[in-house]
Amino acid sequence: MIVAMRSDASQADVDVVVQRITEHGLKAISLPGGERVAIGIASTIPPEVRAPLTELLEVMPGVDHVAQVSRAYKLASREFHPVDSVVEIKGITIGAPTFTVAAGPCAIESRDQLMRAAEAVKKAGAKALRGGAFKPRTSPYAFQGLGPKGLRYLKEAGEAAGLITVTEIMDQHDAEMIAEHADILQIGARNMQNYALLNAVGLLDVPVLLKRGPGATIDEWLLAAEYILCQGNRRVILCERGVHPLDRTYTRYTLDVSAIPVVKSISHLPILVDPSHAAGNRAYVPALCLAAAAAGADGLLVEVHPDPASALCDGPQSLSLGTFETLMQDIRAFCRKKRL
Ligand code: PEP
Ligand code: MN
């Protein structure tokens, strides 16, 4: 439920509305946007309370109207937060009007590999360095990442190149350690509905990049974001990375380009696109990057490796440093109206 106040409502009017809501055992949230104050109720309103509370609030001094929020997610919805959210990290912004590119290897393999990647992606115009230290692998025998040592390399490489950093968290108990070494915590596609993990990162004051599970609907994805938001962490960035494909012959997943304008219309959260995992093949990555920019994404998360042929994880979909540089020139030309 949203209580929209009139533009001439006084602070005392607002305070009394908040008090009435609180008296009903509900949490009132002040909502940003426009010249008028609005107050939202994100918690579930018992059916027997909804009608009488609406009637009560509608006639209170300073109240313009009371609107019911139709969607299951509240804090993630544009109804609750009409203006686009912008996540700011060390002076780098993710969300309109910038187009922010994060790039780097799938997995951190060595100090040298990461330093080379960081220097090259920075030079090409990326603002963030990606690299996994804890890797979710299908096989327990596959390279699982360097763990804490990888995190130390990430911090060092990010600082040396002047890039913010993003890395995946798989275990809620690692949250503090990872947050000490990286600027953005990535929740991977496999963990999109790991509610213990979502709740844990929701309690932190660290930006979270929430990937869409390949089998998740857009509503399920936004409800996963709601878990983080309702714990108090409002710095959530969405990431579309491909959904289960009709045809696996040519691509690993199918990039759901239509999810970009849909999410933009129903949510205020910034959205990045990961074309690498969607394509699974570096040949298709540049086209998907441009498609994402054209569809209104706020940026990209791209896998780049100094020597893709020797990569320990996701080599076939990783761009070489040279290809990434060319791609960034193409994106820059394409996004002339935006700041890259
Ligand atoms: C990754 O970014 O390296 C990764 C594992 O991605 P996803 O969770 O989208 O599969
Ligand atoms: Mn990967």
Image (cartoon, rainbow, N blue to C red):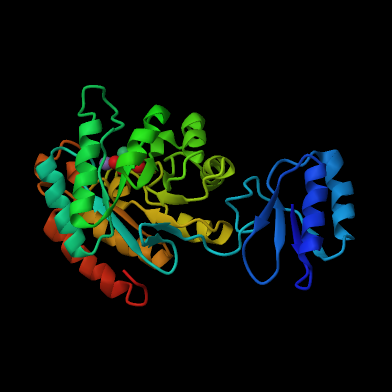
**What residue sits 43% from the left and 48% below the top?**
207
**Quick check: which quadrant has ligand 1?**
top left
Pick the front one: 211 or 13: 13
Pick the front one: 133 or 301: 133
Seen as rendered, the residue at the extreme top is: 140
Left or right, 98 with reference to 233: left
Pick the front one: 288 or 52: 52
Q: Is residue 257 visible?
A: no
Q: Is residue 152 visible?
A: yes
Spot occupied by residue 136 in the image (x, y as percentages of width and height) = 31, 31
Seen as rendered, the residue at the extreme front is: 12
Spot occupied by residue 304 in the image (x, y as percentages of width and height) = 19, 51
Spot occupied by residue 258 in the image (x, y as percentages of width and height) = 46, 57
Spot occupied by residue 239 in the image (x, y as percentages of width and height) = 41, 50
Left or right, 304 with reference to 258: left
The image quadrant of residue 314 is top left
**What residue sits 78% from the left and 56% below the top?**
15
